[in-house]
Image: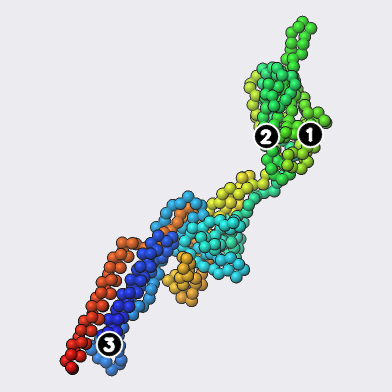
């Protein structure tokens, strides 16, 4: 029996070394949780045996218990790198209608070709649906897909532009206006407008001081009159067929003409469809100050392009777009278990629920009993390399001691055989 006693010790020590080696091998694995082998003695007994005469029969591996202590948190530059401070697991689901649900502590997520938030194995992060304010609207988990655009395109129909034209300006030396010749106009300003597809176009307004009026005595009097030209890209805007629009001020510098918004004829911007446009110059003045723009606005809207994604402390995933829109897309779902040590390891940092672990309880970041989500951070392995190396030496010594006991028993057996011979 002593052979089997020593053999059980060898097997236990070997198991211990295997567990420790597995821990050491995953010291740099994000979200890895170390395991610890626990052992129990083996005693052969019966009711008639005097307990003072009982002799053990070796050792048995009682359990290989996972240790779910938190690993160190490391800051990163990606908003989709997530870590959980405290208990809980991320919930991920493989592709397909019957996709498998797994749980992980590895929060290194990214966006795949379909703009779905996934982990390194392509399993989709699961989240609760939310309303516009980020509040959860249900308990059915769903994958999070980032929209490519946001908003509905609206073609610009009305522009308002309030400027100050300098009263000290003189009529340009070049009398024939050309937008390509800066000497043929006094001032210019550009306004961004949008076509029917939401594409940005540039409308440039050019202001030309009208020539002074010749007096009978040979002097000249500068009139308070200007001519405005507008172009969208290379397309000249016309009002009633005329490209130039008179802009006239009274003696106090207040605009008298046009008295209402200028309604331009329909035009077709490059690459767009036909649209109409009105330009309101209300608030435009003529003073001694230099040319300036007091205000401008337009009623068109572009389609926002996806620019970035963020995750707040409550676990709400939101996307930002080039048009200023921000959309809440989901709230990261966290899972808790009655006995996490009963979770079945699947590899790739995944666990699945078992009868021992119990069914998952779902919640959100910061909820009672759930961990706190941290964005732009990753949880490392909870393996202490120093402690594991010391434990490995101890397990090796245990193996050697059991090997020595086995060798001693072998020598004793040889001696017995020699006596009989």
* Rendered image quadrant of residue 60: bottom left
Q: Is residue 85 visible?
A: no
Name the residue located 43 percent from the left edge and 58 percent from the top edge.
379
Sequence-earlier tag: 3 or 1: 3
Disc 3: which residue: 1
Q: Nearer the viewer, mark 3 or mark 2?
A: 3
Q: Quadrant of residue 198?
A: top right
N-terminal label among 2 and 1: 2
In the rendered structure, are the residues bearing label 3 and label 2 in contact, judged by CB atoms less than 8 Å apart?
no
Q: Are circles 2 and 1 on residues that touch, CB within 8 Å?
A: no
- For disc 2, the marked residue is 191
Query: Residue 416, relative to residue 325: is it above or below?
Result: below
Q: Quadrant of the C terminus?
A: bottom left
Q: Is residue 7 above or below residue 233?
A: below
- Report the front residue among 305 and 84: 305
Report which quarter residue 238 is drawn in.
top right
* Image disc number at residue 264: 1
Identify whether 218 is placed above or below 270: above
Q: Which mark is residue 109?
A: none
């Amino acid at each position: 029996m002593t052979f089997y006693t020593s053999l059980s010790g060898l097997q236990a020590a070997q198991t211990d070394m295997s567990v420790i080696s597995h821990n050491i091998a995953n010291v740099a694995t994000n979200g890895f949780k170390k395991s610890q082998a626990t052992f129990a003695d083996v005693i052969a007994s019966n009711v008639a045996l005097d307990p003072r005469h009982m002799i053990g029969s070796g050792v048995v591996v009682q359990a290989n218990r996972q240790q779910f202590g938190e690993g160190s948190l490391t800051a990163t530059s990606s908003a989709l790198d997530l870590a959980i401070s405290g208990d809980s697991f991320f919930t991920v689901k493989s592709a397909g209608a019957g996709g498998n649900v797994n749980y992980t502590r590895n929060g290194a997520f990214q966006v795949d070709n379909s703009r779905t938030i996934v982990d390194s194995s392509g399993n989709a992060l699961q989240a609760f649906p939310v309303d516009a304010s980020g509040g959860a609207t249900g308990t059915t988990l769903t994958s999070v897909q980032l929209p490519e655009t946001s908003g509905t395109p609206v073609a610009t129909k009305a522009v308002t532009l309030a400027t100050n034209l300098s009263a000290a300006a003189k009529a340009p030396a070049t009398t024939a206006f050309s937008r390509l010749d800066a000497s043929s106009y006094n001032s210019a300003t550009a306004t961004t407008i949008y076509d029917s597809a939401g594409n940005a176009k540039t409308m440039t307004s050019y202001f030309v001081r009208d020539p002074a009026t010749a007096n009978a005595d040979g002097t000249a009097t500068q009139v308070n009159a200007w001519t405005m030209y507008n172009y969208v890209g290379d397309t000249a805007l016309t009002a009633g067929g005329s490209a130039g629009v008179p802009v006239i001020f009274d003696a106090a510098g207040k605009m008298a003409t046009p008295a209402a918004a200028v309604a331009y004829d329909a035009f077709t911007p490059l690459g767009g469809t036909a649209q109409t446009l009105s330009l309101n110059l209300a608030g435009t003045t003529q003073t001694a100050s230099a040319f300036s723009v007091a205000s401008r606005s337009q009623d068109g809207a572009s389609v926002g392009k996806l620019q970035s994604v963020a995750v707040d402390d409550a676990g709400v995933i939101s996307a930002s777009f080039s048009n200023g829109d921000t959309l809440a897309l989901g709230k990261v779902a966290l899972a808790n278990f009655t006995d996490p040590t009963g979770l079945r390891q699947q590899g790739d940092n995944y666990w699945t629920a078992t009868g021992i672990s119990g069914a998952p309880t779902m919640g959100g970041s910061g909820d009672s009993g759930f961990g706190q989500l941290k964005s732009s951070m990753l949880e490392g392995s909870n393996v202490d390399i120093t402690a594991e190396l010391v434990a490995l030496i101890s397990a090796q010594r245990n193996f050697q001691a059991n090997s020595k006991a086995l060798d001693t028993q072998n020598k004793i057996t040889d001696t017995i055989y020699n006596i009989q011979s």
